[in-house]
Amino acid sequence: MKRVLIIYYTQSGQLKQIADSLAEPMIRDKNIAVDYYRIKPVEEYPFPWTSDEFFDCMPESVEKLSVELNLDDFPVDNDYDLVILSYQVWYLSPALPVTSFLRSDVAGAFFKGRKVITLLGVRNMWVMAQEYVKECLREHKAEPVGNIVLKDKAHNLVSVLTIIRWLMGGNKGPYNILPEAGVSENDIKDTSRFAGPIIKALNENHYDKLQEELLARGAVDLKYHLMQMEKNALRIFRIWAKLIRKKGEAGNIKRRLRVRLFKYYLLFVIFVVSPVASVVFVVKRCLLYPSAKRELLYYQGV
Ligand SMILES: Cc1cc2nc3c(=O)[nH]c(=O)nc-3n(C[C@H](O)[C@H](O)[C@H](O)COP(=O)(O)O)c2cc1C
């Protein structure tokens, strides 16, 4: 009997649906037992978010600070052949409850020697968060063996509009000319196509070719211009994070003015600067094709 643990954190339930779709063929296999563990912050984040709450969690997300979790029931001593860490990204960093989990002593004790597949449900910017997750896993002596990224396939600016409507209004569905927000229903259902190579690797206890096989099934569709924008944005987010945190901790009313300035700055960058930056990065990709390709291959791997 092989044992798999799916660790996840979700607000809207989208990531749980993605994980369920991936797990479904494993659950049907009578030689595999699948357990779930939902990361539980002591104080849950709101969903839908108010605008102030949404932007206020940027500094702590970017600085990878911890919030308090309730991990009392985490199956730290159980034997698992494979762990699937399902997470989403907040401000180009893992969501705060996920960072907190990765930095916890419980994670330190649990991950040593474990094989880990990361499963992401995001808008479209996740590369720097994944770098951080890999760093934490390596620190805990775990072995990242696979990565699957489910994202919003709409144009970058369209996905910003739909995600704002979803995360702040609670409505994911299509609206007028706008498509549904987040990962599409079809893509969620289709996540089960990645289970085959995972089951094979699990049964053979051989993971060397797993990411290659997942990539052949479209596990990571990475756009060079988005990746470059993300790298630049994270540098600037770090400066804003420091500036905002000088005024107080998360939720402190004294930092509200700076949080709101950050919000207008971000909207300006997304809607005015990023279309121009995209063109620049597309040209850069053509001019530096071999090194751009190497970079893409690196981030598609584990
Ligand atoms: C505060 C916040 C910040 C986010 N920042 C990003 C981001 O930087 N990149 C990205 O691709 N998605 C971002 N998202 C979208 C999430 O990664 C995720 O897809 C969405 O919140 C749905 O996740 P759920 O399964 O928890 O409902 C953000 C969401 C929230 C709530």
Image: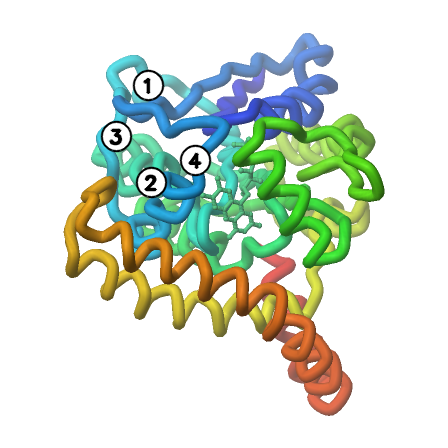
- Which residue is identified by label 2? 102
The residue located at (22%, 52%) in the rendering is 255
Q: Which one is nearer the viewer's eye here, 171 or 188?
A: 171
Q: Residues within 10 Å of mark 4 (few under 14, many from 20)?
A: few
> Element under label 1?
loop
Q: Secondary structure at mark 2?
A: helix
Spatial CA span between label 2 and label 4: 27 Å
Q: Amino acid at mark 4?
A: Thr
Q: What amino acid type is highlighted by mark number 1?
A: Phe
Could you tell me residue 61's position as x and y percent? Answer: 35, 49
Q: Which residue is mark 1?
A: 74
Q: In the current view of this chain or complex, which residue is farthest to the front?
A: 257
Classify mark 2: residues with Cα within 10 Å, few (<14), some (14-19) or many (20+): many
Residue 277 in the image: state x and y as whole percent: 64, 78
Tell me the tag on residue 50.
Answer: 4
- First in sequence: mark 1 vs mark 2: 1
Sequence order check, earlier mark of 3 and 4: 4
Residue shown at 70% from the left, 45% from the top: 152
Kindly report the distance in space between the C-alpha atoms of the residues bearing marks 3 and 4: 32 Å
Residue type highlighted by circle 2: Leu
> Residue 186 appears in which quarter of the rendering?
top right
Cα distance, mark 2 to mark 3? 8 Å
